[in-house]
Image (cartoon, coloured by chain):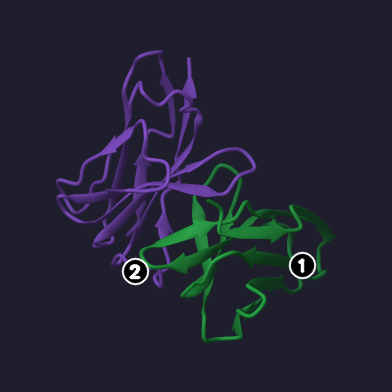
């Protein structure tokens, strides 16, 4: 079963713009993680936000978590062509992560 | 450099054949995972292991088998019972079997049917 559902499924922006991706999840979680996947490669962990946190920053990344709405958002500021990838949210509960279907971000030079 | 190595990168299976995907890590991680990814989809958990000689079924274990004889290695066998094996397979590891740890991934094996 899919825990997270990302929105939008695909996003195309110009270099320098900000990109916002949203994630909704169904069941209670201990944390919400965001991963990035370049085409044909494995996933790379970006950021983890715990269920008792509301916002977290890491470089150009900003993640928010609203447990009352069971939703999270990932903001990438000042995007670069190298940010082109698929982005997945994953809800952590008990022993495992449950992944959403991802958002395909294309950053045009 | 520490990391996870998956091999081969591409694999082809004939009808009725079992194939084994390799996953090796030198991160000294206790927990290891196998996921399946279909086009346009997220990852689905096949099997996981928290320690040597122990492993558990995930959400889609039917048609797959694993072993964990060494801490560094967690091979996945796709058996002939798996009728739709074409997918991208990803191996991951964490320091321990807790969901509050980031997972480290290999670069995957793409399996296709001949």
How many other residues sit within 10 Å of disc 2, few (<14), some (14-19) or many (≥20)? some
Q: Quadrant of residue A56?
A: bottom right
How many other residues sit within 10 Å of disc 1, few (<14), some (14-19) or many (≥20)? many
Residue B69 visible to the viewer: yes
How many marks do you count on the picture? 2
Q: Is residue A19 left or right of residue A65?
A: right
Q: Is residue B80 left or right of residue B42?
A: left
Nearer to the camera, B7 or A1: A1
Q: Please identify the quadrant where the N terminus of chain B is shown.
A: bottom left
Where does residue B72 sit, x and y in percent of width and height? 22, 52
Q: Quadrant of residue A55?
A: bottom right
A79 above or below B81? below
A46 above or below B62? below
Residues at marks 1 and 2 touching, judged by CB atoms closer than 8 Å? no
Where does residue A20 sit, x and y in percent of width and height? 75, 68
Where does residue B8 sit, x and y in percent of width and height? 38, 33
Q: Is residue A13 left or right of residue A61?
A: right
Which color is chain B depicted in?
purple
Residue A88 visible to the viewer: no
Residue assigned mark 2? B98
Residue assigned mark 1? A19
Q: Chain of mark 1?
A: A
Q: Secondary structure at mark 1?
A: strand
């Amino acid at each position: 079963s899919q825990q997270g559902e990302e929105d939008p499924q695909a996003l195309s922006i110009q270099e320098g713009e900000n990109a916002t991706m949203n994630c909704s999840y169904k069941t209670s979680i201990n944390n919400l993680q965001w991963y990035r996947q370049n085409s044909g490669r494995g996933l790379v962990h970006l950021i983890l936000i715990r269920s008792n946190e509301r916002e977290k920053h890491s470089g150009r990344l900003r993640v928010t978590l609203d447990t009352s709405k069971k939703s999270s958002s990932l903001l990438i500021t000042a995007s670069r062509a190298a940010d082109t990838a698929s982005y997945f949210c994953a809800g952590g509960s008990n022993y495992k992560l449950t992944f959403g279907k991802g958002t395909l971000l294309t950053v045009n030079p | 450099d520490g990391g996870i190595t998956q091999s081969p990168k591409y694999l082809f299976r004939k009808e009725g054949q079992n194939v084994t995907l390799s996953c090796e890590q030198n991160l000294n991680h206790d927990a290891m995972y196998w996921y399946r990814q279909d086009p346009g989809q997220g990852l689905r958990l096949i099997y996981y292991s928290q320690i040597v000689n122990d492993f558990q079924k995930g959400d889609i274990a039917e048609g797959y088998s694993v072993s964990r004889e060494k801490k560094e290695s967690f091979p996945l066998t796709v058996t002939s019972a798996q009728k739709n094996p074409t997918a991208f397979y990803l191996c991951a590891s964490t320091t321990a079997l807790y969901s509050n740890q980031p997972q480290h991934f290999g670069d995957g094996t793409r399996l296709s049917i001949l």
